[in-house]
């Protein structure tokens, strides 16, 4: 069929190929960023494990990992002492990997939400997810059954999502504005309920526990958290990261997307639900860590431009490294006291982002 | 489809000799918002390989009609039409039912240039034009060299070659319009729908945009453009359709439509038709009563 527009194809005269050269090289530079970011993440995880109250060497980390992966024997490596091995494998590793998974997932979800709603202020919690999760979590914490926390938080997040989408859907086609407004309404409602419950019944330790959860923390992460957060990121995060072309089509709005052959409504429903399930799984493990999902996609966009095929995976890798380091700071700066990582993400992230914006303007 | 054929046969014949392409034909298009009819039993014909101008005052339904034709807005049938023929709205292009085509396939046949489509995202012009390749490749695939070549020749055809590496946000109105046109051309459409492509453009940019449309038509693309400027339509269109209050009040060749009897009741102004000394096309002069 392309033959029917000979003029369009036929006008690709030879000189028009020339200006392509700089574009192509900057494009491949962008793709080179992926392996670099992956390497940075692996190194970050390795180095972060060595940092803490008891100093560990990178080689010890390697030995512990090799032992647990069943490679210690074949490689002829001595296992670590039980204490030091426990420190690597039971304490620090699950926590750091959870931080990496949560950071990656939040960054991807944030990028997807910003594109879907065409709103630079959108974040993964937009549909009232964090408030819904908080409500579930606070209820079980104050009822004294902290074991149920992840389940309650996930249920709260999914409940908030269902309410928000029902509300948005009841208004008609789910346009970006309706999505944002419905999320805002549900968010405020759940936030009021959380405040009320805390105000009415929290005291002492329970209050501290609730507060730490509300600000977001991976301090109590176990291998189960790694499995849940990591599994969710690998499955849902990968699926979301593959939708780059669909999100690209939304660049100039819904009509433009429809004119490019995208089933606008169906795509938006599916992507919103994917984002919500992934965010719900992450929030159930870490509480609602702010900032990563909002700012990281913007920071990465300054580097990659707006095309999603590169933006989504690079955001994931950058988000993972970012949260690994933020959490390392959270647990070490005021040793032995720990900060909720949400405070650190905002405290580092905001100035860094301001700097990036300023630098981007200089160009 | 018999009624559609009627429309086609009553239209002036602009077929390129040796082809059997019938262009765009739509009939029985209704659209209403809160029971106010925006489009009321509209039928249009756009001959293949010609520039068809869609005229009419503000609010006459031009934009809505384009969106319905493009399939991005579903046309409905008015309740009163229940007794009419069972077919409902029918839009065919070169004999194929557009509504029956899968979305992606339709996006390879027709492209829509909206009015004032913007983005806040940092995007280069080349990347913006590459969006037009989305219907042509798998949703998982990235841009191939062929896609980039198509995007560049589309930029070339729209006269925007030198803008390729600029940021979309930094363009002037005329430049942005050329980029949107290039994005539509990258879809390699056989049918191009444009909503006021000359809006907000200076006179040179307006003539440039219309020149691009003429070239496309000469290459066999069927072009339908909603236009406000009647003199621009007089100078460049082959065929005209005039909408008023959601109804077609006139359709046909330029010389038959741009006459006082048609325009005066629609626009509520006095119209004098002069002749262009060189092209012989109509030149209109307006006066309020």
Image (cartoon, coloured by chain):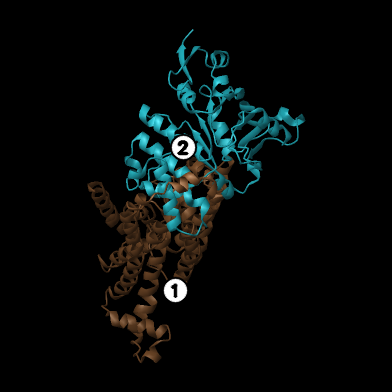
Q: Residues within 10 Å of mark 2 (few under 14, many from 20)?
A: some
Task: Determine whether, in the image, residue B161 is placed left or right of residue B136.
Answer: left
Whether residues under marks 1 and 2 lie with C-beta atoms below 8 angstroms apart, the answer is no
Whole-percent x and y of residue B63?
A: 53, 31
Task: Determine whether, in the image, residue A231 is placed left or right of residue B160.
Answer: right
Task: Determine whether, in the image, residue B101 is placed left or right of residue B169.
Answer: right
Q: Considering depth in this image, is B39 or B35 the residue closer to the camera?
A: B39
Secondary structure at badge 2 equals: helix
Q: Considering depth in this image, is A162 or B109 the residue closer to the camera?
A: B109
Task: Tell me the residue at 51%/37% (across/down).
Answer: B217
Task: Determine whether, in the image, residue A139 is placed left or right of residue A172.
Answer: left
Q: Chain of mark 2?
A: B
- Location of the N terminus of chain B by quadrant is top right
The chain whose colour is brown is A
Name the colour assigned to chain B in the rendering: cyan
In this rendering, is residue B73 above or below A262? above
Q: Is residue A205 visible?
A: no
- On residue A223, the disc is 1
Q: Residues within 10 Å of mark 1 (few under 14, many from 20)?
A: some
Q: Is residue A362 visible?
A: yes
- The residue labelled by disc 2 is B215
């Amino acid at each position: 069929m392309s033959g029917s527009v000979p003029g369009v194809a036929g006008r690709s005269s030879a000189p028009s190929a020339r200006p392509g050269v700089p574009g192509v090289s900057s494009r491949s530079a962008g793709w080179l960023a992926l392996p670099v970011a992956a390497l940075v993440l692996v190194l970050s995880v390795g180095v972060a494990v060595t940092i803490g109250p008891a100093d560990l060497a990178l080689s010890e980390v390697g030995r512990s990992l090799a032992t647990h992966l069943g490679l210690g024997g074949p490689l002829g490596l001595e296992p670590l002492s039980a204490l030091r091995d426990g420190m690597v494998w039971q304490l620090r590793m699950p926590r750091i990997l959870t931080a990496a998974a949560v950071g990656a997932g939040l960054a991807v979800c944030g990028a997807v939400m910003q594109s879907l709603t065409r709103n630079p202020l959108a974040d993964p919690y937009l549909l009232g997810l964090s408030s819904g999760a908080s409500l579930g979590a606070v209820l079980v914490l104050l009822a004294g059954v902290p074991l149920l926390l992840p389940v309650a938080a996930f249920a709260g997040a999914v409940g908030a999502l269902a309410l928000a989408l029902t509300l948005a859907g009841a208004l008609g086609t789910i346009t970006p504005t309706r999505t944002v407004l419905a999320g805002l309404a549900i968010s405020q409602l759940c936030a009021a309920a959380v405040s009320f419950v805390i105000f009415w019944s929290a005291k002492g330790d329970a209050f501290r526990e609730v507060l730490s959860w509300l600000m977001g923390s991976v301090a109590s992460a176990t291998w189960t958290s790694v499995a849940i957060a990591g599994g969710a990121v690998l499955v849902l995060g990968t699926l979301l990261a593959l939708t780059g072309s669909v999100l690209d089509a939304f660049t100039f709005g819904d009509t433009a997307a429809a004119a490019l052959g995208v089933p606008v409504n169906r795509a938006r429903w599916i992507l919103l639900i994917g984002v919500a399930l992934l965010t719900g799984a992450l929030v159930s493990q870490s509480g609602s860590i702010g900032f990563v999902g909002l700012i990281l996609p913007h920071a990465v966009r300054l580097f990659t431009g707006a095309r999603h095929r590169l933006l989504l995976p690079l955001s994931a890798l950058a988000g993972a490294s970012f949260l690994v380091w933020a959490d390392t700071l959270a647990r070490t700066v005021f040793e032995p006291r720990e900060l909720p990582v949400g405070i650190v993400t905002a405290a580092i992230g905001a100035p860094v982002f301001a700097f990036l914006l300023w630098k981007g303007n200089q160009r | 489809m018999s009624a559609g054929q009627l429309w086609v046969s009553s239209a002036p014949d602009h077929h390129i000799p040796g082809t059997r392409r019938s262009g765009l034909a739509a009939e029985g298009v209704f659209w209403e918002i809160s029971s106010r009819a925006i489009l009321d039993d509209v039928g249009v014909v756009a001959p293949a390989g010609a520039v068809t101008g869609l005229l009419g005052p503000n609010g006459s339904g031009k934009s809505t009609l384009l969106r319905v034709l493009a399939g991005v807005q579903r046309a409905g049938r008015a309740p009163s039409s229940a007794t009419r023929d069972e077919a409902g709205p029918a839009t065919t292009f070169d004999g194929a039912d557009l509504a029956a085509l899968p979305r992606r396939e339709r996006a390879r046949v027709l492209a829509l240039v909206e009015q004032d489509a913007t983005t806040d995202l940092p995007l280069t012009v080349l990347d913006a034009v590459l969006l037009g390749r989305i219907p042509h490749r798998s949703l998982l695939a990235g841009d191939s060299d062929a896609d980039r070549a198509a995007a560049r020749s589309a930029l070339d055809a729209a006269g925007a070659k030198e803008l390729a590496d600029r940021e979309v946000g930094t363009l002037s109105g005329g430049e942005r319009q050329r980029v949107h046109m290039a994005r539509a051309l990258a879809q390699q459409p056989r049918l191009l729908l444009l909503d006021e492509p000359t809006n907000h453009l200076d006179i040179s940019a307006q003539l440039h945009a219309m020149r691009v449309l003429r070239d496309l038509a000469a290459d066999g693309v069927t072009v339908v453009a909603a236009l406000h400027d009647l003199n621009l339509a007089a100078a460049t269109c082959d065929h005209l359709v005039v909408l008023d209050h959601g109804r077609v009040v006139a359709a046909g060749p330029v010389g038959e439509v741009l006459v006082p009897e048609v325009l005066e009741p629609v626009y509520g102004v006095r119209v004098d038709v002069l002749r262009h000394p060189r092209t012989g096309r109509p030149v209109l002069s307006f006066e309020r009563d």
